Amino acid sequence: MSLWTIVLRSLRQHALSTVITAFSIALAGGLLMAVWVVKTEAQRNFSQVNAGFDAVLGPRSSKLQLVLNSIFHMEASPGLLSPKDVDDIRKHPAVQHAIPIAVGDNYYGYRIVGTLTNMLTDVEYTPGKRYRFQAGRVFDPALREAVVGSFVAQKLGLKVGGTFQPFHGLNFDPKSQHQETYVVVGVLEPSNTPTDRVIWIPVTGVQLMGGHDAALSSQVSAVLIKLRGGAQTGFRLDTMYNKQGDRLTFAWPIDTVMTQLFDKIGWFDKILALVAYLVALVAAGSILASIYNSMNERRRDIAILRALGARRGTIFGTIVLESATIATLGMVAAFVVYAAIVGTAAAIIRSQTGVELNAMAFHPVMIWATGGMIALGALAGVVPAWKAYRTPVAENLVPVS
């Protein structure tokens, strides 16, 4: 009789405890892999998203707030820029593109952003890729027309030829609807960027919307900037606006600003990882307890095996192999738990930010977490295996009445 045959019979005999213990391993392994992958993928994707721009110029505020508001369409606008500030940056010889944006309205919670047409026609949101239209065309700057991101179009059912009336403010309030009606003239193809969650209209549409302060109608929320000359240009503008000036903020480079965000919330990832490690230890403990508590039931079986010629080392190896097998079954199921957690997290992040995580991407954690959990499971089997190793043969051959 082989070791595997003995192990499989034992697992069937203690099927309920095997399933429960393997499930605890699955939760621990799945949570550990999911925490690691979501953290890594989120940091990589958010750091790479810049909408095709190198920097953002806005009113005096934190760089992070400026980037989140202008690039990721989150947070509130920190203030407004005057027409002179916009003209100055657009005329700067180091600037290739300087595209103003104006925010302040929404449609059922999705932001309406005013901008220029070249935002949707000339800008490469990633190298070699420009926004493409799934249907329709870009808006006419002189008309009340809108271009809808793919995610918004899907969620709200907006199509070319459809109309809508914006709501005032960044948060949806059914009592604050504007009188102006906009016609949807274009729907963008998915880009897996925050642009997918935005409704784009002419910048003057936001500025002149009814209910807005007429005295501020010529101002914008921020300017998205594409530089010429690389890092040296960025350093000069950073010095000019952030160190020598005190009215405006030049958020550059965007990827560094986002990296700083993840550095600030790194403690949260560590807490989740600690929870995963603790769950792993509890799961290993459950293997130990499950097998150890079954040793009294197995004494006669072990004694019979010994009487038939099985060595102490064989008995010891059988128990350790059984523990490792339970952990292996748990880690197979852990990938189902992992897929559920990461898939849900990716859907939430996609819905809230427009950034898509690759839930199926391979990460080294899948190897070392699997190997580590199996090794931990085998280690948990050492204590009950030692108990089996020391089981006296003569005392346990007699059937228990």
Image (spheres, helix red, strand yellow):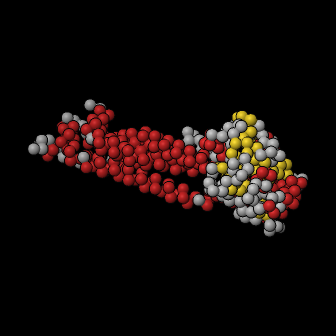
Task: Return the residue nearer the eye: 104 or 233.
Answer: 104
Q: Residue furthest front?
A: 179
Location of residue 238 with respect to 29 vertically, above or below: below
Location of residue 168 with respect to 393 vertically, above or below: below
Tell me if I can see residue 255 in this picture: no
| Identity of the residue drawn at 75% across and 56% down | 210
- Assign the N terminus to one quadrant of the image: top left
Residue 305: percent from left, percent from top: 21, 37
Q: In which quarter of the image is residue 171?
A: bottom right
Is 249 situated left or right of 285 in this image?
right
Tell me if I can see residue 395 in this picture: yes
| Identity of the residue drawn at 80% across and 58% down | 217
Q: In which quarter of the image is residue 58?
A: bottom right
Q: How many marks?
A: 0
Is 22 situated left or right of 335 in this image?
left
- Assign the C terminus to one quadrant of the image: top left
Location of residue 189 with respect to 376 vertically, above or below: above
Residue 387: percent from left, percent from top: 26, 49
